[in-house]
């Protein structure tokens, strides 16, 4: 039973409803960006999500819809001028002071930043170490329950303009704003919906734009990145970097980027070759940036660096001239100690990963949702509900293939699907009900990790 709201909380809910209406009305151009930024700060206060989450679904929808709307340059200019006028009217009325920070002189950037701050507050845990309702379940299948008061309720709330455009616009703002806030929002959305989102990251030009953004965030120093990026990247480094990339906030940025890299390398459906698919060809841009970032970690200005080490180690193998960073060496030693093989654990983890992926299981097919016209998931095998196929031909070929014929695998997978998320003991028990030999685990592992 929800508790009764206090007067102030009711006022906030009313304000959010009004704001949602303003934001949804295209003729209104979204009100004043400075007022919105103030509202975002209120939403960051601890305990407040219990109030606004159930009440203001419309507000979330408005914010995410605006940041992911595609516009022409002319439309962006018109919006910028409208926002400038709205803010000026606010100053004239004495509602608040004019904006003085040098970071966001552009009212459009201020507006988008404020929208991201609002999205960020929804996606952030209320207290450090806690998880938000949206992310309290791990694994994409569990997240979108229709539990009242938990919003966004459904993937469509995250992708009001479709998955591809959502990704395109998030990356655009990450590149333009140079702030950790949109990067954090992108990380949260990728974490929740990696099977839907990751494939889009592999398509040019989004892939290059995304990598460009990561490299700039890691260098945090204008002019250090000398890589010859393709023209499709199209973003220019600002003459001077905002204070988000300045010395005061580098730690925060690195931690945010590290968690983004983690979703890529170890997310719920991360495949063995995902890193290669994303980073290949850009090693020479990425490795210097990662090493710069690791130097900063070493000097104590950032904490999280496991994923940076993972990436450095991956890139280092492809760039033989580079000495491994001392932090990467330490990380490798730790990691090899952890990998003392637990075969059932490995099998379960790999099956789970494969289960969430969105690629065709046809022999040497590998088509993914990024290759389909509508970016819809591929149809599943109706019996095991595990493998997916881009066509009837692929399904037929997989059924009778020479190694790993699906007619043999299908009954096994049918047994594994219900226990993929179960405790390791439960998974192991299910394995034994199949009357398999232990020696079949490597056979299954090679099938499940082939790419
Ligand atoms: Zn204002
Ligand atoms: Zn196929
Ligand atoms: Zn099947």
Image (cartoon, rainbow, N blue to C red):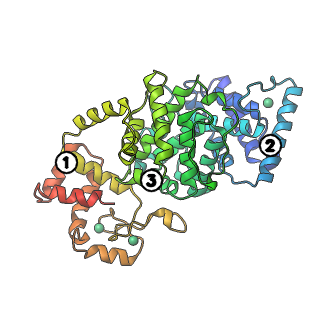
Q: Residue at x 67, y 44 (%)?
A: 236
The image position of residue 306, as x and y in percent, is: 38, 34
Q: Earlier in the sequence, mark 1 or mark 3?
A: 3
Q: Which is closer to the viewer, label 1 or label 2?
A: 2
The image position of residue 423, as x and y in percent, is: 24, 43
The image position of residue 444, as x and y in percent, is: 21, 59
Q: Which mark is residue 427?
A: none
Q: Is residue 412 left or right of residue 194?
A: left
Report the front residue among 368 and 149.
368
Q: Label 2: state its secondary structure.
A: helix
Q: Residues within 10 Å of mark 2 (few under 14, many from 20)?
A: some
Circle 3 residue: 280
Picture quadrant of residue 94: top right
Within 8 Å of ligand 2, the CB of disc 3? no
Vertical comparison of 254 with 423: above or below: above
Q: Residue at x 68, y 52 (%)?
A: 69
Q: Earlier in the sequence, mark 1 or mark 2?
A: 2
Q: Residues within 10 Å of mark 1 (few under 14, many from 20)?
A: some
Residue reaching furthest right? Answer: 92
Task: Tell me how far mark 2 sits from mark 3, CA to CA.
Answer: 37 Å
Q: Is residue 260 left or right of residue 400?
A: right
| Residue 160 visible in the snapshot | no
Circle 2 residue: 80
Q: Label 3: state its secondary structure.
A: loop
Q: Label 1: state its secondary structure.
A: helix
* The quarter of the picture showing ligand 3: bottom left
| Residue 413 visible in the snapshot | yes
Circle 1 residue: 344
Q: Residue at x 55, y 66 (%)?
A: 374
Q: Are marks 1 and 3 in contact (CB under 8 Å)?
A: no
């Amino acid at each position: 039973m929800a508790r009764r709201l206090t007067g102030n909380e009711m006022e906030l809910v009313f304000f959010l409803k009004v704001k949602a209406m303003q934001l949804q009305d295209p003729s209104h151009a979204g009100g004043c960006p400075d007022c919105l930024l103030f509202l975002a700060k209120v939403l960051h206060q601890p305990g407040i999500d219990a109030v606004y989450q159930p009440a203001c679904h419309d507000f979330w929808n408005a914010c995410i819809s605006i940041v992911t709307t595609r516009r022409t340059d002319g439309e962006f200019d018109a919006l910028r001028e409208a926002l400038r006028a709205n803010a000026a009217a606010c100053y004239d009325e004495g509602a608040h002071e004019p904006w003085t920070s040098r970071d966001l002189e552009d009212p459009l950037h201020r507006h988008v930043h404020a929208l991201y701050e609002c999205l960020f507050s929804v996606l952030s845990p209320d207290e450090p170490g806690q998880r938000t309702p949206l992310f309290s379940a791990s694994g994409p299948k569990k997240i979108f329950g229709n539990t009242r008061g938990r919003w966004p309720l459904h993937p469509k709330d995250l992708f009001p303009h479709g998955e591809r455009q959502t990704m395109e616009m998030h990356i655009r703002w990450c590149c333009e704003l140079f702030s950790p806030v949109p990067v954090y929002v992108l990380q949260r959305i990728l974490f929740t919906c990696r099977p839907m989102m990751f494939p889009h990251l592999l398509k040019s030009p989004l892939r290059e734009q995304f990598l460009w953004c990561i490299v700039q965030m890691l260098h945090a120093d204008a002019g250090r990145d000398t890589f010859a990026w393709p023209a499709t990247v199209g973003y220019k480094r600002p003459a001077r970097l905002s204070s988000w990339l300045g010395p005061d906030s580098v730690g925060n940025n690195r931690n945010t980027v590290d968690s983004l890299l983690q979703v890529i390398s170890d997310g719920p459906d991360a495949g063995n070759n995902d890193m290669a698919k994303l980073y290949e060809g850009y090693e020479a841009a990425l490795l210097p940036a990662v090493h710069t970032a690791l130097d900063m970690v070493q000097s104590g200005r950032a904490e999280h660096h496991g994923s940076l080490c993972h990436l450095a180690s991956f890139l280092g193998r492809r760039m033989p001239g580079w000495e491994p960073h001392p932090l990467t060496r330490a990380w490798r030693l730790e990691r090899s100690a952890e990998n003392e093989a637990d075969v059932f654990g490995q099998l379960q983890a790999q099956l789970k990963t494969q289960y969430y992926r969105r690629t065709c299981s046809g022999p040497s097919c590998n088509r993914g949702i990024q290759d389909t016209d509508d970016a819809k998931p591929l149809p599943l095998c109706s019996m095991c509900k595990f493998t997916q196929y881009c066509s009837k031909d692929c399904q037929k070929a997989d059924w009778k293939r020479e190694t790993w014929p699906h007619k043999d695998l299908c009954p096994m997978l049918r047994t594994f699907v219900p226990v993929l998320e179960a405790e390791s003991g439960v998974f192991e028990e299910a394995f034994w009900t199949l009357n398999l030999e232990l020696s079949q685990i490597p056979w299954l592992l090679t099938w499940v990790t082939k790419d």
